[in-house]
Image: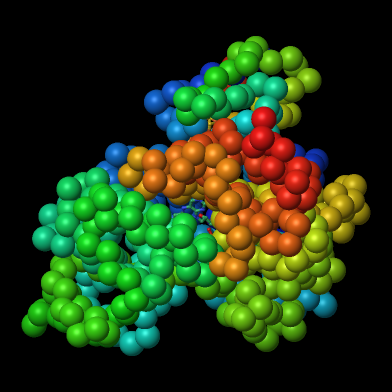
């Protein structure tokens, strides 16, 4: 019997496995992952693990706790290097091939790198090993940590380092943090949050070059405005790119970066018959947002997409019911200092911002993002109950008036 | 069936509330409250989903 093959053993991939098993599929399942160890749950890697509060072991994926029950042929350290959607054949890095009954692609994303050679002491953060390597350097008490990029991961690392009592400089090339996702006044909230917590925040400047000592260890950087900053540890947090390079010759449709990148799927997460994609690498028309094509790099979405892909796969092979189209209201959270930031939906820098509860000044608020007569997103800072209510409302309707009613009560 | 919350782990991000608002409620004081700690048996699938989704692994089903 040909197996169902899941490529990527992280959140989306393992959610797919769990959903195939709970959907009653008892046949063979092969799970591949390039990583030599079982992938960790990523959110704690920039928070509790980096802070030294948790051992890495505690950051296991929730669905990997009962691996033996899932009964999979798990092949770690093995990458998929090619896929033929017509014959459902996968070629692997160890030279072997697998003939599959169906394939779930869950290869996620990888940190965007700085081109060229970098000195030692310059890190990216994606895996458990990355988090431990960075943590070891922080344990040695560097005089200053430099964070390049004020996106969520950069911002969380900055906050965690401050929590450890380290000096931090954060450099961001755009004038306002998160410029691509947030309107300016809310982006400045993020900059102020870090400044108020003692981070030296520099906006509108980029990295020019690294400074290194004779042993090749980083000693600092030169910025595009000519400033030199001494730092013994540098974190690069300039975003992620979907890991779909191995699919370039597969014939599957891949989207260019300006269209969000990733694998082009239909509303059921199908890239081709019996070939599904889930998680950070998947782009699909989201029914909750009038069918707008989205690729989401967020925890809950990876879990939900993996779960859907598992059900959809059983339907494709005739072993389950049609789960229907996949739609979701993207949901993201980030912990920085004492701010619990939560965001539902998809904001655009051009949206009109309405603060409907609390105030930005007191650091407790809910902001809604309006486009035309629709509410497209809600951002809550230290307002979890209202943020989740807003998310539930968005799942029901995008209508601006109904969202406002929620806050008028 | 009983639901246990490990309040040392819970960060009150209300993800469980989105799954089962009839059981979990995060209030304005930013704490999670259980509206019942012995949910009816028909809520079991929802409770299992909440356990699975809780990013802090703070929930547990007993029995
Ligand atoms: C440090 C950090 C903190 C985060 N914090 C938050 C947060 O607070 N809130 C939030 O909502 N989201 C957060 N995220 C995002 C969230 O973790 C991701 O959206 C989620 O991990 C995506 O899961 P995935 O399974 O799609 O992909 P990934 O987790 O990227 O996993 C993909 C897997 O595929 C494997 N792989 C890749 N290519 C191949 C191949 N060719 N063959 C075989 N295997 C392959 C990789 O080794 C990897 O294990 C964070 C991410 C990071 C890195
Ligand atoms: S999902 Fe988990 S962490 Fe979040 S409120 Fe519920 S129990 Fe607490």
Q: Nearer the viewer, residue A92 or A277?
A: A277
Left or right: A336 with respect to B36? left
Q: Is residue A105 above or below residue A197?
A: below
Q: Is residue B50 above or below residue A353?
A: above
Which of the 4 quarters of the picture holds residue A140?
bottom left
Left or right: B52 with respect to B7? right
Q: Nearer the viewer, residue A23 or A341?
A: A341
Q: Is residue A211 above or below residue A39?
A: below
Quarter of the image that includes the N terminus of chain A: bottom right
Examine the rendering and report whether any part of residue A231 can be seen: yes
Q: Nearer the viewer, residue B34 or A57?
A: B34
Residue A16 percent location from the top left of the image:
69, 51
Residue A75 percent location from the top left of the image:
56, 59
Residue A338 percent location from the top left of the image:
35, 40
Residue at 53% over, 36% down: A384
Residue at 44% over, 74% down: A112
Q: Colour scheme in the image?
A: rainbow
Examine the rendering and report whether any part of residue B59 can be seen: no
């Amino acid at each position: 019997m040909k197996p169902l093959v899941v490529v990527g053993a992280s959140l989306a991939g393992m959610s797919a496995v769990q959903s195939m098993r709970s959907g009653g599929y008892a046949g063979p399942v092969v799970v591949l992952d390039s990583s030599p160890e079982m992938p960790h749950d990523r959110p704690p890697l920039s928070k509790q693990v980096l802070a030294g509060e948790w051992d890495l072991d505690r950051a296991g994926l929730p669905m990997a706790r009962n691996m033996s029950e899932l009964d999979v042929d798990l092949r770690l350290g093995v990458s998929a290097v090619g896929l033929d959607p017509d014959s459902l054949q996968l070629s692997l890095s160890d030279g072997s091939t697998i003939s599959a009954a169906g394939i779930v692609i869950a290869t996620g994303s990888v940190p965007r790198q700085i081109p060229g050679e970098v000195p030692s002491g310059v890190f990216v953060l994606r895996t458990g090993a990355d988090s431990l390597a960075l943590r070891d350097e922080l344990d040695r008490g560097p005089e200053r940590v430099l964070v390049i990029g004020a996106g969520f991961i950069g911002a969380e690392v900055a906050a965690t380092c401050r929590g450890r009592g380290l000096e931090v400089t954060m450099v961001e090339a755009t004038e306002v943090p998160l410029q691509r996702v947030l309107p300016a006044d809310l982006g400045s909230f993020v900059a102020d949050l870090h400044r108020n917590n003692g981070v030296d925040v520099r906006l509108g400047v980029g990295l020019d070059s690294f400074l290194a000592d004779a042993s090749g260890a980083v000693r600092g950087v030169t910025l595009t405005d000519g400033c030199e900053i001494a730092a013994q540890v540098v974190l690069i947090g300039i975003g992620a790119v979907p890991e779909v390079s191995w699919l370039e010759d597969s014939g599957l449709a891949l989207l260019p970066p300006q269209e969000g990148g990733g694998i082009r799927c239909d509303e059921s997460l199908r890239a081709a018959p019996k070939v599904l994609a889930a998680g950070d690498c998947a782009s699909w028309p989201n029914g909750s947002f009038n069918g707008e094509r989205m690729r989401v790099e967020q925890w809950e979405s990876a879990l939900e997409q993996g779960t859907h892909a598992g059900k959809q796969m059983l339907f494709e092979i005739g072993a389950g019911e049609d789960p229907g189209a996949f739609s979701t209201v993207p949901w993201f959270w980030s912990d920085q200092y004492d701010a619990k930031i939560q965001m539902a939906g998809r904001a655009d820098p051009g949206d009109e911002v309405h603060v409907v509860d609390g105030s930005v000044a007191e650091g407790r608020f809910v902001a809604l993002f309006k486009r035309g007569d629709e509410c497209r997103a809600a951002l809550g800072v230290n307002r979890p109950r209202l943020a989740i209510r807003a998310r539930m409302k968005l799942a029901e309707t995008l209508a601006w008036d109904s969202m406002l009613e929620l806050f008028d009560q | 069936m009983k639901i246990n919350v490990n309040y040392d782990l819970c960060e009150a991000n209300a993800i469980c509330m989105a799954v089962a608002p009839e059981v979990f409620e995060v209030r304005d004081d930013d704490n999670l409250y259980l509206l019942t700690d012995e949910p009816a048996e028909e809520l079991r699938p929802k409770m299992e989903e909440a356990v699975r989704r809780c990013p802090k692994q703070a929930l547990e089903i007993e029995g």
